[in-house]
Amino acid sequence: MSQERRERGKEKLGNQVPKSKWVGRACYAVLIVAAFGLAYYLGNRTQHRHDGFAHCLAERGVKMYGAWWCPHCLEQKEKFGASFEFAPYVECGIKGDVHGVAQVCKDDNIQHYPTWQFPPTGERVERVFTLQELSDRTGCALP
């Protein structure tokens, strides 16, 4: 008799998945979405961890002169990550013209990239700096 009941139960269910399996699948889906959300949040938060440092450099009058086509400038920008948007940057390159130099850089007599200018003396240094070196030179604290 129990065999007959099982057969009738299978006929009623057809290809349906029992409710308990749907609950388990839904829990897994929620956990996966939550894990991706957490990873995105943590990754995005750390990309902006130097915002305050970049703002401090700008407030102190530090400047970085660079060009969009310069590989060393790209290396310097990558050290700041997403926080570079707040760094005191002067673009010397003219988009689409590798040999063109912006007038502001001509006026400031910038010859090589990247060039950092440090106040109050106006000292210029032509190289890539670590963030720690910039912190030591300017007194801006790193996170």
Image (tube, rainbow, N blue to C red):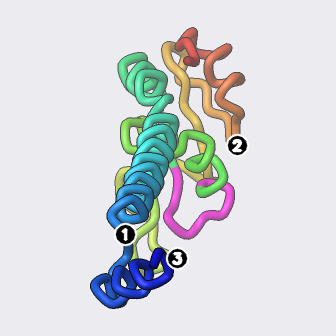
- The quarter of the image holding the N terminus is bottom left
Please indicate whether residue 61 sits to the left or right of residue 131 in the image. Answer: left
- Residue at position x 44%, y 79% in the image: 6
Helix, strand or loop at label 2? It is loop
Q: Amino acid at mark 3?
A: His
Helix, strand or loop at label 1? It is loop
Q: Amino acid at mark 2?
A: Val
Q: Earlier in the sequence, mark 2 or mark 3?
A: 3
> What stretch of residues is rendered in magenta?
66-73
Cβ–Cβ under 8 Å for marks 2 and 3: no
Q: Earlier in the sequence, mark 1 or mark 3?
A: 1
15 or 32, which is in the foreground?
15
Please indicate whether residue 101 sits to the left or right of residue 71 in the image. Answer: left
State the residue lying farthest toward the front: 1
Q: Amino acid at mark 1?
A: Pro
77 or 106, which is in the foreground?
77
Please indicate whether residue 27 sits to the left or right of residue 98 in the image. Answer: left
Helix, strand or loop at label 3? It is strand
- Magenta-colored stretch includes residue 56: no
10 or 69, which is in the foreground?
10
Locate residue 33, reporting x and y percent. Answer: 40, 54
| Label at residue 99 | 3
Question: Image quarter for residue 123?
Answer: top right
Q: List the residue tagged with mark 1.
A: 18
Distance from Cα at disc 1 to Cα at disc 3: 69 Å
Please indicate whether residue 9 sits to the left or right of residue 71 in the image. Answer: left
Locate residue 127, reporting x and y percent. Answer: 71, 43
